[in-house]
Amino acid sequence: MHKAEPVPNKIRYEIGQKRCTFCGIFLSVDDTRCICCKAVLRTRARGKKN
């Protein structure tokens, strides 16, 4: 229900989508917490060196 629109994975974080590691979904929200489980959302890729 709250899932973000599908886009190529390498640009998800660049366009502002955030990932919930517990739910396993990407969200397009301004909040830093997941809508479902209130976990902190990931804003950068894990393998990113920046």
Image: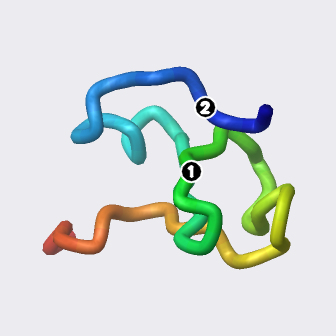
Q: Is residue 19 above or below residue 14?
A: below
Question: In the depicted view, which residue is nearer to us: 48 or 23?
Answer: 23
| Residue at x-position 61% and y-position 73% | 22
- The residue to which callout 2 is attached is 4
Residue depicted at x 55% and y 22%: 5
Q: Amino acid at mark 2?
A: Ala
Q: Is residue 43 above or below residue 46?
A: above
- Element type where label 2 sits in the image: loop
Residue at (64, 44) in percent of width and height = 27
Within 10 Å of the Cα at label 1, are there few (<14), some (14-19), or many (20+) other Cα atoms? some
> Which corner quadrant of the image does residue 47 belong to?
bottom left
Frontmost residue, 23 versus 38: 23
Residue drawn at (84%, 60%), measured in percent from left and top?
A: 36
Q: For the C terminus, which image quadrant?
A: bottom left
Q: Secondary structure at mark 1?
A: strand
In the picture shown, does residue 26 fall above or below 45?
Answer: above
Residue that label 1 marks: 25
Query: Measured from the top left, where is residue 10 in percent x and y?
Result: 23, 40
**Residue 4, percent from left and from top:** 61, 31
- Badge 2 crowding class, 10 Å Cα cut-off, few under 14, some 14 to 19, many 20 or more, is some
Decide if residue 11 is on the left or right side of residue 40: left
Discs 2, 1 touching: Cβ within 8 Å:
yes
Q: Is residue 38 left or right of residue 28?
A: right
Q: Is residue 30 left or right of residue 36?
A: left
Which quadrant: the N terminus?
top right
Residue 37, image x and y in percent? Answer: 82, 70
* Amino acid beneath label 1: Ile
